[in-house]
Amino acid sequence: MVLRICLTLLFAMVYAGTARGDVLFEGYAKVLSGEEHIGYVISRYEFDQKKKQFISTYLLRTGKGPTETTESLKAYADSELTPLSYEYTSLAGKDSKLIDAKFKSGNLSAVVKNNGKVSRIEKKIPKGTFLSTFLVYLMLKSKEGLKSETNYEYQAIAEEDGAIYKGQALVGKEETYNGFKAFKILNTFKDIKFLSYVNERGEVLGTNAMGQGIVTELVATPSEAIGSVPYSASILKTLFGKVPEGDSNVVSRQKKLKANEANTPAPTKQLGVPPGQGIQLKGQPEKTEDKGN
């Protein structure tokens, strides 16, 4: 439960000037319990220009054997982030849960299958309520935008139970996290507090469930996130349409940039400056040695 709530702020990216069906964000994150690598998260955000819809897709996998847990989500919202539908699934040992939810005219109608037992959720959704997976987008679209010393109060639907909860996100000053500039955000949702490190573009670089010892970190490659945790290409293809490459994020771009620089010959009088060198790339992340806590 704690890890699911941490994922509320795990991945997002600013929506602006994207092409039809463009991927706004795609990345892999490793999940740590203390120093132990216990799982991974794969997430993708898209905006369909034709349908004017945001799409959030993710898969979480932790543990092995009897402790193995898998969660997935496919959620849709309109251009104003009003909920349209979502499908949430979880498998933990012998326990299974599926929620198939639809929204229409301000009402939620969902079918819940919990260990084979079927029930329904029918409720009125107050105006301004959104799916928790899109929280960072709501912050970016607010009048204040994402800036230091800002307090965001909200109410959102927790996809894992279809219930509405009040939340609060306190944005602190910009600092350095894993070599990247990021805002430190204290989020409270479902009476659980956790920290998130979010850059100015809305990309969340990591989370820390306070008091629980659960940490997530956005990494540059799939192998860094997956480690020895079970992995199924067929499940990923079913959920995402293909196996995600996870390279549409600042951490992956930074690693590729450094690799390209390392493979570029040093400039000489004969060669001059290699193409692309000496040009300041817009939005290029700055790298330092500090790490936020």
Image (cartoon, grey):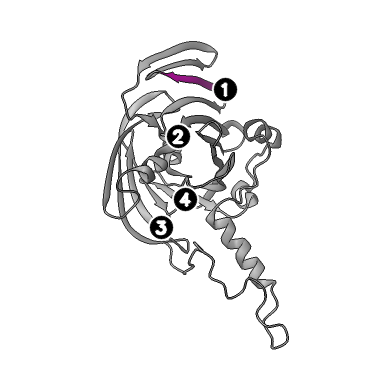
Tell me if label 1 and label 4 are in contact, CB under 8 Å. no
Q: State which quadrant residue 72 falls in.
A: top right
Q: Which numbered marker is on residue 203?
A: 4
The residue that mark 2 highlights is 79
Badge 1: residue crowd in 10 Å (few <14, some 14–19, many ≥20)? few
Work out whether mark 2 precedes mark 1 in sequence or the reverse, and give the earlier one: 2
Work out whether mark 2 precedes mark 4 in sequence or the reverse, and give the earlier one: 2
Q: Nearer the viewer, mark 2 or mark 4?
A: 2
Image coordinates of residue 252 in percent, x first then y, are 59, 56
Q: Nearer the viewer, mark 3 or mark 1?
A: 3
Q: CA distance from mark 2 to mark 4?
A: 19 Å
Circle 4: residue type? Glu
SS category of the residue bearing label 1 = loop
Circle 3: residue type? Ala
Q: Residue at x 66, y 67 (%)?
A: 260
Q: Which numbered marker is on residue 182?
A: 3
Work out whether mark 1 precedes mark 4 in sequence or the reverse, and give the earlier one: 1
Magenta segment boundaries in residue numbering: 96-104
Is 119 situated above or below 274? Answer: above
Circle 1: residue type? Lys
Work out whether mark 4 precedes mark 3 in sequence or the reverse, and give the earlier one: 3
Q: Residue at x 41, y 55 (%)?
A: 200
Is 117 situated above or below 41? Answer: above
Q: Nearer the viewer, mark 2 or mark 1?
A: 2
Q: Say whether residue 97 is magenta.
A: yes
Quarter of the picture holding the N terminus: top left
Image coordinates of residue 93 in percent, x first then y, are 57, 27
Is 232 situated above or below 273? Answer: above
Badge 2: residue crowd in 10 Å (few <14, some 14–19, many ≥20)? some
User: Would residue 159 appear left or right of 92 to someone viewing this image?
Assistant: left
